[in-house]
Image: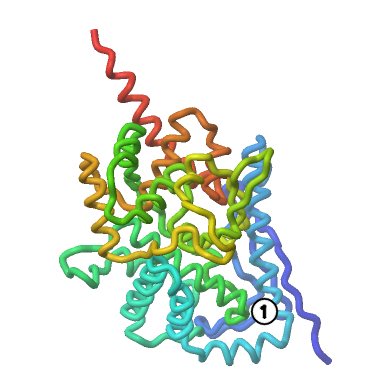
Amino acid sequence: MERTRSVKLREKILSDGRKSLYLDYYPAIYIPETGKETRREFLKIYLYDKPTNPTQKEYNRISKAKAESIRSERELQFINQNFDFADRLNAKKDFLAYFKAMAAKRNKSKGNYDNWYGTYKYLDLYTMGKCTFGQVDEKFCEGFKMFLDKVKSIKSEQASLSTNTKYSYYNKFRACIKEAFEDRLFAVNPLLRVKGVPQGETHREFLTLEELKAVYLTECEHPVLKRAAIFSALTGLRWSDMIKLTWKEVQHSEIDGYFLRFTQQKTKGAETLHIPEQAYEQMGDREDDKERVFRGLKYSAHTNLILSRWIMNAGIHKKITFHCFRHTFATLQLTLGTDIYTVSKMLGHRHLKTTEIYTKVIDKKKIEAANRIKL
């Protein structure tokens, strides 16, 4: 007769007054690393035994929720007999091949694809070209994070990876693990208790209002590039959304004026973005609904060179990329008094934290302004 299987979340009071959370398995499970059976798995999650304030109560609530999430995943693996056979099959599958296929799906966006393929090259180096799903566990994930921290750049043996390159690569690795878990290639998410790589501070270059006006009044040898860049500075639209924008997505109403209804390439979120009259003027004459608004706009080294010459001809000595026009929109909106929640929505950010990066630029400008008055 088949025994009933269960995974219970339990607490153990420690000598320092805290509670340690652990999982209680019935029947006992076999641990290959130790060669022994056990009924307990300590989660290294702790609670205040007697919380005395709202902060401690909230900490307990979040910790319990995290522990319950782990318990649920363990229960799926433990109780559902179908996982046993599937796990053994999936464990033999090629993880590197899966990751490379995930990278190939991003080939519509050069920057995103380059990041994914860059991650693949370091994974290939870390695993010496061989890695199955069965090898990708919590220890493997922690090890890859440490590897990125110490490895020298493939492009130059003298340089290490920058903080934000490590952040970007490890996020791609995490995204692949998440997708594989959703595809049921992992019974338990190996990243469940692994922290990500912290993001470093970044310098976001932008144009001041005076510089933007100078650029607007300067001729550019690639007219479509100029119109698209000014449009981005007036609306905050990303390059990836700009190049695929069609006239069908450009709409108008007597009350609201002109607006775009489109799906973000990066987040896949459905967006409605109101645009000013000046931005609409940059779009040119309306064409058939299926036609691209900025037809002829494409990414290339030559396009970047034209952009650099245009900025230089405007008398501006900053390293400006196309994405800097989006930064310009965000910075100018906040500088001119638009609240951060509205700017966040206009940029299509999922999290306010992403938009808060621009407030550091504003704070710096305030300090500079305060120091201008001298007695």
Viewer can see residue 354 = yes
- In this view, the residue in front, 284 or 96, is 284
Answer with the quarter of the image where residue 373 lies. top left
Percent x, y for residue 259?
Answer: 60, 47
| Residue at 37% across, 74% down | 117
Q: Is residue 299 above or below residue 77?
A: above
Quadrant housing the C terminus: top left
Given residues 30 and 298, the one toward you in this image is 298
Q: Residue at x 27, y 18 (%)?
A: 372
Quadrant hosting residue 124: bottom left
Split into 4 quadrants, where in the image is the N terminus?
bottom right
Furthest toward the right, the residue is 1
Residue labelled with disc 1? 77
Picture coordinates of residue 332, whole percent (x, y): 42, 35
Left or right: 231 in relation to 256: left
Residue for point 66% across, 46% down: 49
Counting the numbered discs, the total is 1
Left-right relation of 6 to 224: right
Q: Residues within 10 Å of mark 1 (few under 14, many from 20)?
A: some
